[in-house]
Image (cartoon, coloured by chain):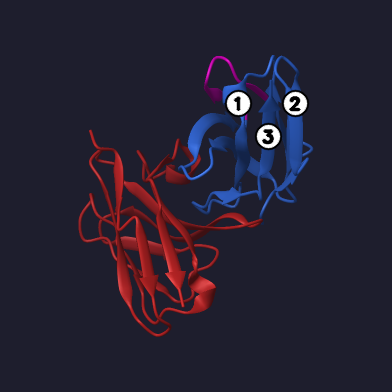
Amino acid sequence: QQPVQSPQAVILREGEDAVINCSSSKALYSVHWYRQKHGEAPVFLMILLKGGEQKGHDKISASFNEKKQQSSLYLTASQLSYSGTYFCGTVDQTGANNLFFGTGTRLTVIP
Amino acid sequence: NAGVTQTPKFQVLKTGQSMTLQCAQDMNHEYMSWYRQDPGMGLRLIHYSVGAGITDQGEVPNGYNVSRSTTEDFPLRLLSAAPSQTSVYFCASSYSSSGGAQETQYFGPGTRLLVL
């Protein structure tokens, strides 16, 4: 039930853009995005709900394709502070109250 | 608000020992959960609770017990520690019991556990 993320790692120069993808084999109710810096706890970025509702940061954008059971996180004009590991989490439509996380995408932004 | 707190920050155990990882939140959240994080594996759900007195198993519950006697506290017990339980453990909470997993999760700082 764990979603699959791609790429596993990406290196950017400041100002460049990146897209992180998340896909599931199950019909999804919601997709969540978190960022974790080394040695710290994951921090909430965004939730995308079935039906189009989104909750999250103004500077982060993401999409949720319900039919394809996929989500993408868009990081534009990257800053050094964007470095970290990005996790997507999914809640499926079975009604179970479980959030399953992917294995993460390590993003490194260099000057 | 302190948010979600976890103790201890770091613990070393010998195989077969038992211990309790503490988790508390002061946000009056109904939903609480425990995750373990291993290199290359992401975060995996161990147990969760939708309110005081109600707990359920997650993805990897074997070897762990939980209880929820109050809204604030959600301890995780390792019954007989094994080296495979070496990991970083995160506690998380969110506001609603009915949609707890579907809402923003607030994570504690984590407990690093080493089992020798």
Residue in the foreground of this view, choosing between A5 and A2: A5
Residue A88: quadrant of the picture = top right
Sooner in the amino-acid sequence: mark 3 or mark 1: 1
Pointer 3 with pointer 2, Cβ within 8 A: yes
Which label is found at residue A109? none
In the picture, measured across the screen, residue A11 lies left or right of residue B43, that is right
Residue lying at 63% horizontally and 24% vertically, measured from the top left: A52
Q: Check if residue A52 falls in the magenta segment.
A: yes
How much space separates mark 1 and mark 2, taking CA atoms? 10 Å
Q: CA distance from mark 3 to mark 2?
A: 8 Å
Mark earlier in primary sequence (3, 2): 2
Q: Position of residue B91 (x, y in %)?
A: 39, 52
Question: Which chain's colour is blue?
Answer: A
Q: Identify residue type, mark 2.
A: Leu
Residue where numbered disc 3 is placed? A107
Return the x and y of residue B81 as percentages of the image width and height: 42, 78
**Residue located farthest toward the bottom when viewing the structure as drawn:** B16
Are marks 3 and 1 in one subunit?
A: yes
- Identify the residue at image location x=23%, y=49%: B72
Q: Which residue is mark 1?
A: A82
Instruction: Residue A37: give x, y in percent of width and height.
Output: 53, 38
A5 within the magenta span: no
Q: Which residues are magenta?
A: A51-62
Residue at the disc numbered 2 = A12
Query: Under tag 3, what secondary structure?
Result: strand
Question: Marks 1 and 2: CB-CB under 8 Å?
Answer: yes
Q: Quadrant of residue B107?
A: top left
- Tell me whether circle 3 and circle 1 mark residues in contact (CB < 8 Å): yes
With respect to residue B38, does A35 lie above or below? Answer: above
The hue of chain B in the figure is red
Q: Chain of mark 3?
A: A
